[in-house]
Amino acid sequence: MKQKIIDPWGSGLLEDYEKIIKDFGLEIFDSKLFPQPNRIMRRNVVFAGRDLKIIADAIKHRKEYYVLSGIMPSNEKIHFGTKMVVENIKYFQEHGAQTYILVADLEAASTRGVTLEEARKRALDFHIPAYVALGLDVKKTVFYFQSENKEVMNNAYEFAKKITLNEFEAIYGSADPGKIMAAMTQVADILYPQFKERMPGIIPVGVDQDPHIRLTRDIVRRFKERKFFLPAGLYHKYTPSLDGDIKMSKSKPESCIELPEDIKSVKRKIKNALSGGRDTLNEHRKLGAVIEKDMIFELMKQHIVEDDNELNKIYRNYKSGEMTSGELKEIASSMMEEFMNNFTRNIGQARKHIDKLNFVKFK
């Protein structure tokens, strides 16, 4: 039987979310667990997790817990998957979580060939301001660079004693030295907030990052004497490619929207995106849109339309044939222009305050 692998460094597509839940032992996400669920929670874009009830309990009873995520400063732009991660960080931040953002400069160096100096520059010039522009509250966020955190590095080496090469390959598919170092550092990052105080923590990510959480949970079970809480995971679906593939990919630039991107380019891509409209106007008016195939409606559902009533109205009008594909794309283009303008402006504002960020000071 072929080994099932989710590869956080790969580009493979995962086509069946129900199968992923079954194969990797995930919990189906239930938005009723959490108070005031955000847009992507309400709309089942967040689809699975691990140990979610522990986090829900911490929120309900105002117990200490944390939310943590990492910035991979290997590119000069981000994508909609990153946007969803930040939106979930913001949700937990607003519901009492201690918030940690690490800059994965060592991982960028070992797996992407980015120097530590370049990683720092990209993080400060763009990635952190982008997170702020998407809603991260810097006043409630602790930042650090992997390369400066000796506690993380020391624990990474300690944790490495508890995993075998065969076990690593079973989780990740292969085990080159750079990948091993990056993964063990991520384990220590995930547990870093617990080094001083044991408490539950949640890691919101795309499901392709689940191997890091599985590895961390395995290692926690083998370090029972340290009494770590098992980290919880929260997983969102991919933002589909505009041509209908399950995931936007930079390998197909005309089907991928980046953040930020020139609005003329964005509007062109929206115009050319896979549509659920019928072949003729008469047929469309009679039968309505095949909305499940429409990539622009999916983009609107996941990212652009915040108000559920507004989205439902668009859905009804498009599904009934009252609204055409062209009209839907016009609405999406207008909304995307407003979003991109706000995003770019907010990044500029965030850059002005980059020196006031709360970075951990290491001895």
Image: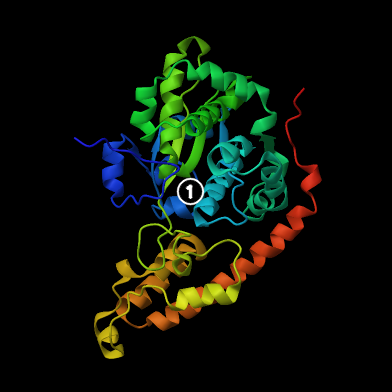
Q: Quadrant of the N terminus?
A: top left
Above or below, 128 relative to 306: above
Q: Quadrant of the C terminus?
A: top right
Give, as a three-letter code, the residue at label 1: Pro
**Is residue 259 visible to us here?**
yes
Q: Where in the figure is residue 313, as x and y percent of width and height?
A: 41, 72
Question: Mark 1: which secondary structure?
Answer: loop
Where does the image place residue 8, in percent across and percent down from the top left?
A: 44, 41
Percent position of residue 95, x then y: 57, 40
Residue in the image at 61% along x and 67% along y:
340
Tell whether 82 sits left or right of 309.
Answer: right
Q: Which residue is more in the foreground, 321 or 101?
A: 101
Residue annotated with mark 1: 37
Residue 169 image-quadrant placement: top left
Identify whether 142 is placed above or below 159.
below
Q: Residue furthest left?
A: 1
